[in-house]
Image: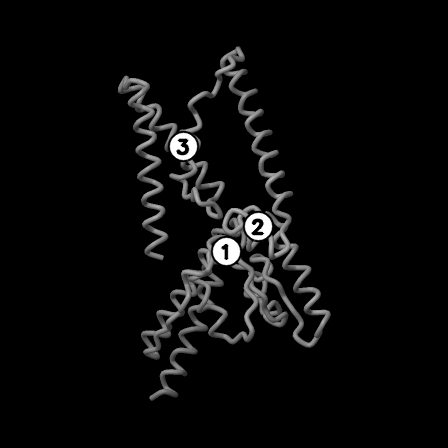
Amino acid sequence: MIVLRSIIFNIAFYVNLALYLILGSEFFLTPRKWSVRALQVWARSSLWLLRVICGLHIEVRGVENIPKGPVLVAGKHQSLWETFAILPYLDDPCMVLKRELSWIPVFGWFIFKFRMIRLERGAASAALRKLMARGVEELAAGRQIYAVGSNEQAARLSGVNVGNVRLFVYTLLGGLAALAGIMGAGLLSTAPTNLGLGTELDVIAAVVIGGASLAGGEGTILGAVIGAAIMAVIRNAFVLLKLPIYLQTITIGVVIIIAVALDQLRKRRT
């Protein structure tokens, strides 16, 4: 019976994989974040097949210790099970994989798409040096900001220059604020000193509604854009309803409180 179940699962697993690779080939052109989510759907479907066909359930202990956002994953030993079982627990993984996996048609292309670290197991110390170099490279590829926001001490111990990351972020923030001021002055054909005063709450509410965490280490550009659009609709509704300014401010504050409360509730459940 065990042998029969194993054979059925292997057939179902590879058929499921082939369908996802063929039907999900458009994710090769989408942003990496979207592609990772599609990969996690495949992983969950594979775990479901394992549970239904083989009757196997998995238990992962210490999930609460897995940080949100980008993570580097270097497993002591990798098997076929590990290639899909741990994916649902990782928000944005960069995994160390056997180089041979990248030779598989279509499947290997997605390894390049996900920017996984490919290693030659027989290269000994050279493979270790490559692992360290690629790890730093992946951290430098826009992940350092997430790393610092998620856990500053862990980022520092991982070789991230926290001071430079902070300097870059605040410099970029200042430049974008200056650009917003120029656009606002052009819109109003004047440059009042209090231009933009009070919009801070709108900005905070927009990014929180868009999925960013006030604790740091979590959030997306797309989410911030969607949050900003929602805030624009709310502000327009305020004007149409002719609500007083103080009620508008109170409402935005309530929106922020609710969004933060939901974010904390979600984190406790996960």
- Residue 126 is left or right of residue 21, and the answer is right
Circle 2: residue type: Arg
Q: Which of the marked residues, 2 or 1, is nearer the chain's N terminus? A: 1
- Check whether the beta carbons of the residues at disc 2 and disc 1 lie within 8 A of each other: yes
Name the mark nearer the viewer: 3 or 1.
1
Assign a secondary structure to mark 3. Answer: helix
Circle 3: residue type: Ala
Residue 263: x and y, percent? Answer: 36, 46
Q: Please tell me which residue lies in front, 268 or 3.
A: 268
User: To which residue does mark 1 refer?
Assistant: 92
Residue extending furthest toward the front: 153
Assign a secondary structure to mark 1. Answer: strand
Q: Please tell me which residue lies in front, 189 or 255.
A: 255
Assign a secondary structure to mark 2. Answer: helix
User: To which residue does mark 3 refer?
Assistant: 229
Residue 189: x and y, percent? Answer: 52, 11
**Compared with residue 97, is residue 180 higher up or lower down, i.e. above or below?**
above
**Compared with residue 254, is residue 81 higher up or lower down, i.e. above or below?**
below
Residues packed near mark 2 inside 10 Å, few (<14), some (14 to 19) or many (20 plus): some
Q: Residue at x 58, y 24 (%)?
A: 178
Q: Which of the marked residues, 2 or 3, is nearer the chain's N terminus? A: 2
Any mark on residue 143, and which? 2
Residue 94: x and y, percent? Answer: 56, 60
Q: Residue at x 44, y 31 (%)?
A: 203
Residues packed near mark 3 inside 10 Å, few (<14), some (14 to 19) or many (20 plus): some
CA gap between label 3 and label 1 equals 25 Å
Q: Residue at x 34, y 25 (%)?
A: 249
Q: Which of the marked residues, 3 or 1, is nearer the chain's N terminus? A: 1
- Residue 218 is left or right of residue 74, and the answer is left
